[in-house]
């Protein structure tokens, strides 16, 4: 997915998830292009209480459909890094790629990869491999969302 430019920057985007409504105090919309044409890519930023503490959460939508979610690492205030669990096909849809037991799919070679429990401590953290990106690296955040979009369409 090639990023063409910024379309809009805004505040207080509301998204209705199946289990809750979430307000993203900040968002940025990009125009992207791939072999299917142009797309609107939205990055929504909020804080959420997960894994035992308040953390930054970034969700990436492509054409109004969420394709990737990142959660702030324990050292986010110093590193600015977010993690997104790597998912692979399972018996019933997708499942996490288990850390450290499973190999990381080759298609993730372009990303910085770490074991989720090495960067996030707290209740409910799963033993999964995760892609890592800085909150300011929108190109990497969008690239992961585009990859996940392609995987779901296969």
Image (cartoon, rainbow, N blue to C red):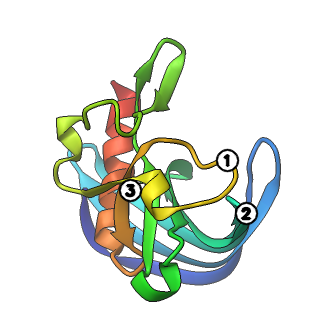
In the figure, 2 relative to 45: above or below?
A: above
For mark 2, give the secondary structure.
loop
Q: Based on the displayed image, in which of its 4 quarters is residue 154 positioned?
A: top left
Circle 2 residues within 10 Å: few <14, some 14–19, many ≥20: few
- Marks 1 and 2: CB-CB under 8 Å? yes
Q: Return the mark for residue 52.
A: 2
Q: Residue at x 49, y 53 (%)?
A: 117
Circle 1 residues within 10 Å: few <14, some 14–19, many ≥20: few
What residue does disc 1 label? 124
Mark 2 or 3: in front is: 2
Q: Residue furthest right?
A: 20
What residue does disc 3 label? 39
For mark 1, give the secondary structure.
loop
Q: CA distance from mark 1 to mark 3?
A: 34 Å
Circle 3 residues within 10 Å: few <14, some 14–19, many ≥20: some
Q: Residue furthest top?
A: 91
């Amino acid at each position: 997915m090639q990023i063409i430019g910024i379309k809009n920057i805004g505040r207080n985007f509301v998204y209705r998830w199946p289990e809750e409504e979430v307000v993203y105090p900040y968002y940025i919309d990009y125009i992207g292009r791939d072999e299917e044409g142009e797309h609107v890519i939205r990055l929504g930023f909020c804080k959420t209480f997960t894994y035992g503490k308040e953390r930054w959460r970034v969700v990436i939508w492509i054409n109004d459909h969420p394709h990737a979610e990142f959660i702030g690492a324990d050292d986010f205030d110093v590193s600015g890094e977010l993690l997104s669990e790597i998912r692979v096909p399972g018996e019933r849809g997708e499942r996490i790629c288990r850390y450290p037991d499973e190999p990381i799919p080759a298609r993730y070679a372009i990303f910085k990869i770490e074991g989720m429990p090495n960067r996030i401590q707290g209740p409910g953290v799963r033993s999964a491999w995760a892609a890592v990106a800085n909150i300011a690296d929108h190109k990497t955040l969008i690239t992961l969302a585009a990859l996940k979009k392609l995987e779901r369409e296969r």
